[in-house]
Image (tube, rainbow, N blue to C red):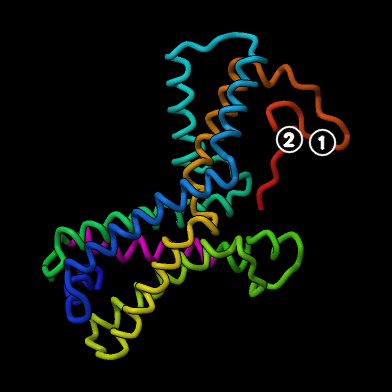
Amino acid sequence: MLTYNPIADAPSYITPLVMQIYVVVMALLVIGGTILDTLHKKSAKYFFRYKKESDAMATRRLGSGERLAIAVATAAHDVLASGEFCNPRRRLAHLLTMYGFIFFVVTTVILVFAYPTAEAAPAWVTALWHIGALMVCVGGYWFWFTMRVDVAAEGHPWYRVVRADLFVLSLLATTTFALIWSFLQWRDAGLWATFFFWLFVAAATVLFGTVFWSKFAHMFYKPAAAYQRRVAEANGAMDSLPPPADKPAQFGLGINRELPRHY
């Protein structure tokens, strides 16, 4: 099954051109939703104000080489390794979900644009498509049922859903329905395969079309926040803040001086 290209059989319900247009539209929805989310939450304004305050409170200036090194360290630690998570189980679940999502999206684009009707697509592409979806399911369901904040810290049941859960639930639905559809299509299950194909499309549409309301955009500006924090630590701006109090409060730069707690 790992070498099977389900996209090649999709033209029985949808033409390759329509599939390609759909992928482009979903990409535009992500870009547009991220921009709207940034404007609505005033994230860009916050980052520029943060930078201005950080520069004003800095005790030394950073050279371009130092800034480049900070950017590389941020990418390696905060982005590629998800080092902000203190809980190793939470970190592993996040990495499985993140890299699985990347594999799944990239190979979907490759299959849709390069091999939309070729059953003999490169084995590594189809394998990564299935493995990526499976990684998302493993990491996502592991997080949802055992490590979600409401479950781990507040004792709420796993089926308690709020708007912040839209991203993870639509992501899990997308990859779950994709795997079921691929298996049924591979087994030539007829109407059942068609049914799960459209469930897969519907879930993907919710995932990419609700960026403005979900936490999808968070993955784009979180690295920028991590970089700003590292710069503030390196240029001495963090040292200008008052020491932590018994009840941590927000100080200049909007930084909470409390130790992070990730569940």
- Is there a contact, CB below 8 Å, between mark 1 and mark 2? yes
The part of the chain drawn in magenta is 123-141
Query: x and y percent of residue 109 in the render?
Result: 25, 57
Q: Kindly state the secondary structure of the residue where label 2 is placed.
A: strand
Q: Quadrant of residue 85?
A: top right
Q: Which residue is mark 1?
A: 248
Horizontal and vertical percent position of residue 42: 59, 40
Which residue of the protein is positioned furthest toward the right in this rendering? 246
Quadrant position of residue 187: bottom left
Along the line of sight, which residue is nearer the eye, 62 or 260? Answer: 62
Residue 55's place in the image compared with 137, above or below, is above
Q: Residue at x 54, y 44 (%)?
A: 39
Q: CA distance from mark 1 to mark 2?
A: 7 Å
Residue 256's tag is: 2
Q: Is residue 18 left or right of residue 93?
A: left
Mark 1 secondary-structure assignment: loop
Q: Is residue 89 magenta?
A: no
Q: Single out the residue that lies furthest toward the top.
A: 60
- The x and y percentages for residue 188 are 22, 87
At label 2, which amino acid type do we have?
Asn
Residue drawn 52% across and 12% down? 62
Q: Residue at x 47, y 44 (%)?
A: 220
Position of the N terminus by quadrant: bottom left
Q: Is residue 66 left or right of residue 48?
A: left
Quarter of the image where one finds residue 185:
bottom left
Decide which of 49, 232 is in the foreground and name it: 49
Specify few, some or many for label 1: CA neighbours under 10 Å numbering under 14, 14-19, or 20 or more.
few
